[in-house]
């Protein structure tokens, strides 16, 4: 009797492309975290922030790095499911949105210069080449930014004007969508699967 030979499932070209994209996105996040941590060192060296603030910001960077490493390891595994790699990228996007929201709130919400951090998950979503994921991520970024800006404003009422709050929320949310629409034109998905 001949024993059946079980072979590992080979990745289809779309799986290979998606795995390569997931690995590259997680690797780029190492540079992202490194740049963030270098900025914390610079702020600490110039005594711009308190020791408690440096500790909180460094912890946020450490958590982002740890999650990026876990997702990088997961992305390197060979899986036969297309959705496995999509899930890894979506997890990376969710982590980026939470990180950006935390930093924006910590930097006084409405007056934060870290609003730019919300571009990272939007650009990450564009790499998947799915309009649905890109627009969904953009909506989540707008929701997260508006939530932390409004929350900080009303937690520390009297630090600014309401018209300034609503103007900034509307402007930055609109800019997130402008970025997404520009990326849609540049990326142009050839085949939408979800």
Image (spheres, rainbow, N blue to C red):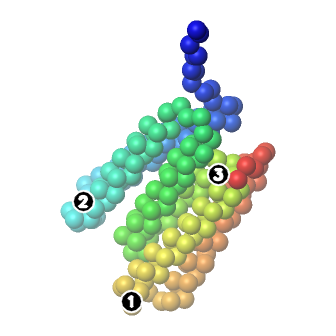
Q: Position of residue 42 (x, y in %)?
A: 31, 53
Q: Nearer the N terminus, badge 1 or badge 3?
A: 3
- The spot of residue 167 in percent (x, y) is 58, 82
Residue at 60% from the left image edge and 61% from the top image edge: 137
Residue lying farthest top?
Answer: 1
Disc 3 target residue: 126
Q: Secondary structure at mark 1?
A: loop
Q: Is residue 112 above or below residue 156?
A: above
Q: Which mark is residue 55?
A: 2
- Helix, strand or loop at disc 3? helix
Say which element carries label 2. helix
Residue 157's tag is: 1
What distance separates the C-alpha of mark 1 from that of mark 3?
Answer: 37 Å
Q: Is residue 79 left or right of residue 104?
A: right
Residue positioned most to the front: 1
> Is residue 154 left or right of 86 when viewed as pictured?
left
Q: Position of residue 77 (x, y in %)?
A: 49, 33
Tell me: residue 3, above or below residue 146: above
Q: Quick check: 183 left or right of 78?
A: right
Q: Residues within 10 Å of mark 1 (few under 14, many from 20)?
A: few
Residue drawn at x 61%, y 68% as measured from the top left? 139
């Amino acid at each position: 009797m001949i024993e059946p030979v079980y072979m590992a499932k080979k990745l289809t070209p779309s799986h290979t492309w998606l795995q390569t994209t997931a690995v590259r996105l997680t690797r780029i996040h190492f540079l992202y975290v490194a740049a963030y941590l270098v900025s914390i060192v610079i702020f600490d060296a110039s005594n711009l922030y308190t020791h408690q603030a440096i500790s909180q910001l460094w912890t946020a960077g450490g958590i982002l790095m740890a999650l990026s490493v876990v997702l990088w390891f997961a992305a390197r595994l060979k899986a036969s499911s297309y959705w496995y790699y999509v899930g890894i990228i979506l997890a990376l996007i969710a982590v980026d949105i939470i990180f950006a929201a935390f930093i924006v709130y910590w930097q006084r919400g409405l007056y934060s210069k870290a609003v730019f951090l919300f571009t990272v998950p939007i650009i990450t979503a564009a790499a998947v080449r799915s309009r649905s994921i890109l627009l969904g991520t953009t909506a989540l970024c707008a929701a997260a930014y508006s939530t932390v800006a409004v929350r900080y404003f009303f937690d520390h009422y009297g630090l600014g004007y309401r018209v300034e709050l609503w103007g900034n929320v509307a402007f930055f949310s609109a800019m997130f969508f402008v970025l997404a629409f520009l990326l849609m034109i540049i990326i142009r998905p050839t085949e939408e699967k979800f």
